[in-house]
Image: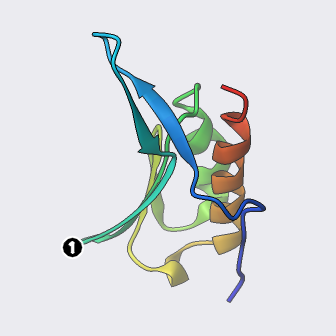
């Protein structure tokens, strides 16, 4: 099975800023197992259509929304494409 890595070993966080001005550190990449499968959250992407337009066709049997990729099992998707989407999310939010 293909593997992917992100070239940073530290946990990746972003800063959320609320309307009242308070801030909070929050994960940028999240993984959530649930009753219907697995959800991978990629937060911090400015264009909420980018993931779907860029990765959905090549990803396989997955639902792609603005910041979430949902699939039933790893064998249903192209893991290399998932890795590319995660790397894009990390790289696109650097320097924010």
Up/down of 24 relative to 67, above or below: above
Residue 10 vs residue 96, the one in the foreground: 10
Side of 61 relative to 33 (left or right) = right
**Residue drawn at x 69%, y 65% as measured from the top left:** 9
Q: Quadrant of the C terminus?
A: top right
Q: Residue at x 73, y 59 (%)?
A: 8
Q: Nearer the viewer, residue 47 or 59?
A: 47
Residue found at the far right of this picture: 7
Give me the residue at 58% from left, 51% from top. 12
Image coords of residue 33 (percent x, y): 32, 71
x, y (%) of residue 61?
A: 49, 67
Please say if 58 is above or below 38: above
The image position of residue 67, as x and y in percent, is 47, 42
- Tell whether 47 sits left or right of 73: right
The residue singled out by tag 1 in the image is 35
Element marked by disc 1: loop
Image location (x, y in percent) of residue 5 = 72, 70
């Amino acid at each position: 099975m293909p593997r992917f890595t992100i070239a940073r070993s530290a946990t990746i966080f972003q800063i959320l800023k609320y309307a009242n001005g308070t801030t909070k550190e929050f994960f940028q990449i999240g993984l959530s197992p649930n009753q219907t499968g697995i959800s991978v959250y990629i937060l911090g992407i400015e264009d909420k259509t980018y993931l779907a337009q860029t990765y959905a066709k090549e990803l396989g049997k997955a639902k792609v929304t603005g910041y979430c990729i949902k699939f039933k099992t790893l064998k249903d998707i192209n893991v290399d494409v998932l890795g590319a989407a995660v790397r894009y999310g990390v790289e696109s939010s650097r320097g924010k």
